[in-house]
Image (cartoon, rainbow, N blue to C red):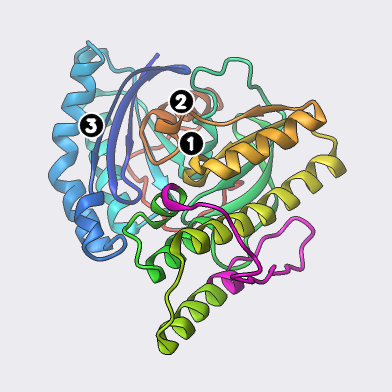
Amino acid sequence: MKILSIESSCDETAVAVCEGRRVLSSAVATQVEEHKIYGGVVPEIASRRHTEAISAVCDKAVKDAGITYSDIDAVAVTFAPGLIGALLVGVNFAKGLALSLSVPLIPVHHLRSHIAANYIDNDALKPPFLCLMVSGGNTILCEVSDYTSFKIIGGTTDDAAGECFDKTARAMGLSYPGGITMDKIATKSDFTKYPLPVPKSAGEYDFSFSGLKTAVINLIHNKNQKGEDIDVPVLAATVRERVCDMLISKTFSAVENLGYKTLAVAGGVSANSELRARIEEECKKRGMELFVPQLKYCGDNAAMVGVQAFYEHASGNVAGSGLNATATLPIDYR
């Protein structure tokens, strides 16, 4: 079954063609350079660029897959969550394409597809497993009991981990996307030089990053007011370590309490070098299986949407022409 999938939830216009877990093509038009000017994604600009790019990106994905539109068996699209204007571009294009080809339309949840990025080239990964889904807009800890069955056991009570990275990086004067830039320039952390708080959260497996973000921004403002220089690589490393401390602590607390032997990490922050290295080390200590996506599938892409769509379709999740975009929707929606 060949599925053409579309992803437009933020600032990447992406289209892919997949067969099950196999990716036949994956095309992406990125807007990163344009949004760098503003230090973050401007929703109105993002939706306009999606409108301009989506048709050509779709044609490229079909051509790169070595097929024609008549070979497509279904069309899948990210319908939630994300920037509403950006989502609407993808959803409406997908509805029109599915109608014109007379094929099923498969709605895919963005966070589910991030988890599905781990299925690409990883035939060994099968539910049940525990997943840490961590990105710029979301940070959740969930049990994956089946390919379309999820249970949230923890999540951020305020900011997402990726947002903490991006906002503190911007305060340091680093270019967008801040989390990636911070990871590249970070050297060695030093909590004696830059003492940072360890935010607490009420839930056993919940996260909180707002206090850390605020502390870093206040520290930088205080230094600037005094005319003191900031050792940006050291501060970046200190922030990175603190965020990873919180993610790892809660994740492995859940691992131990719930008895999981398989862990997956997903989302844009799964590309963070320290997080990947430290989680791998912790899994080795416990004799656990760890799955993380290839770096090219950590960020937003349509290949992960197509892979998740295969399982959504198998479970009977097919939409009609009334499908609409939704800005917020939990991963365990029914």
- Identified by mark 1, the residue type is Ser
Location of mark 3 (residue):
97
Residue range in magenta is 184-213
Inspect the magenta stretch and tell me whether residue 333 lies in it: no
- Identified by mark 3, the residue type is Leu
Location of mark 1 (residue):
113
- Identified by mark 2, the residue type is Val
Label 3 Cα crowd, 10 Å radius (few <14 / some 14-19 / many 20+): some
- Kindly identify which numbered label has been placed on residue 316: none
Location of mark 2 (residue):
307
For the residue pair 318 and 62, the one nearer the viewer reads as: 62
Marked residue nearer the N-terminal end (2 or 3): 3
Q: Residue at x 21, y 47 (%)?
A: 50
Residue 314 in picture, x, y percent from top left: 53, 22
Q: Is residue 259 above or below residue 142?
A: above
C-beta proximity under 8 Å, tags 1 and 2: yes
Depth check, mark 2 against mark 3: the one in front is 2
Q: Residue at x 51, y 60 (%)?
A: 234
